[in-house]
Image (cartoon, rainbow, N blue to C red):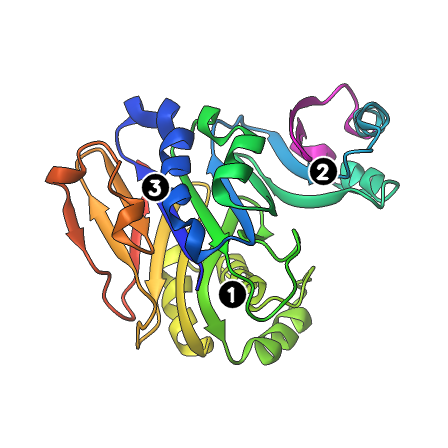
Amino acid sequence: MCGIAGLFLKDRRLEGDLGALLAGMLAPLSDRGPDSTGFAVYGEGAAGTLKLTLRGPRTLDADALLQRLGEAAGGPVVHRRHDTHLVVAMPAEREAAVREALREFPAVALVGAGRRMELFKEVGRPDEVSRRFGLARMSGTHAIGHTRMATESAVTTDGAHPFTTGDDQCLVHNGSLSNHNAVRRDLIREGLSFQTENDSEVAAGFITAQLRGGRSLEQAMEASLGALDGFYTFVIGTESGFGVLRDPIACKPAVMAETERWVAFGTEYRALVDLPGIDGAQVWEPAPARVYRWELH
């Protein structure tokens, strides 16, 4: 019993409101997931630049970390601090050197990477976590969020969603996969690595493996239907896209809405009620085993 919210903007004039709109979607889902909250925001990116989202303890010497990363990047790294998370940007060709430098700071976790994606997650209710990270001030083209009720693992930040296993790609999940251990073993043999034992990370890894194999997001999601067993609703973000998939039984609640300005997903309709123009939106329940996907033009 978790809560999912996702928003894909078709009207660029709304981009400055993306974070505030997503925060308003997550807050009503607090009772579905009071344990932890996370969200991924796809904002501006620059060609040849990579952004890393890092998480560290409050006692972290950020100046020492940034100095070392700057040495590895070949110059000062642009950075922004969001509570326990730090977003740093550097030349993409220096990624390997920067990742190697991060090994010198074992208390720092790499939360996400990509040209556009910034990913934040922590233990706590969505209104609290959104406020701590300043979600309402974030902008971009699309974003997904998750409120977690831990049913099969401990309440930790590492167990919070979204899960990411590839650049600019992440996934949030409501449900439970029954064959995730077997799929994880197969993916590890293919060269993927995992940070947790969470079944949702396996789903993210499966999508990553499909994309790396040359498949489109739509094809990767279709392949999930045959490869992943269990009850699930996935919302997936990529650099240019936003996708929704429910399992063939579709016992987990889900609702979607679309206007000329946006497309939105919520576990329940109450997550959508404050979106601009919702009264005139097309509203529907996504069908079982059907891929829904939108791409930036």
Q: Which mark is residue 260?
A: none
Image point 48% across, 37% down: which residue?
A: 41
Quarter-of-image position of residue 64: top right
Quadrant into which the N terminus falls? bottom left
| First of labels 2, 1 by sequence position | 2
State which region is magenta: 72-95
Name the residue tied to disc 2: 95
Residue 216 visible here: no
Circle 1: element type: helix
For disc 3, the marked residue is: 7
Residue 40 image point, x, y percent:
50, 42
Left or right side of 262 for 234: right
Quadrant of the image occupied by residue 205: bottom right
Q: Residue 187 in magenta? A: no
- The residue indicated by pointer 1 is 203
- Quadrant where the C terminus sits is top left
Kind of element beneath mark 3: strand
Asked whether 76 falls inside the magenta stretch, the response is yes
Q: CA–CA distance between discs 1 and 3?
A: 20 Å
Q: Identify residue type, mark 1.
A: Ala
Query: Label 3 to label 2, Cα distance in Å?
Result: 29 Å
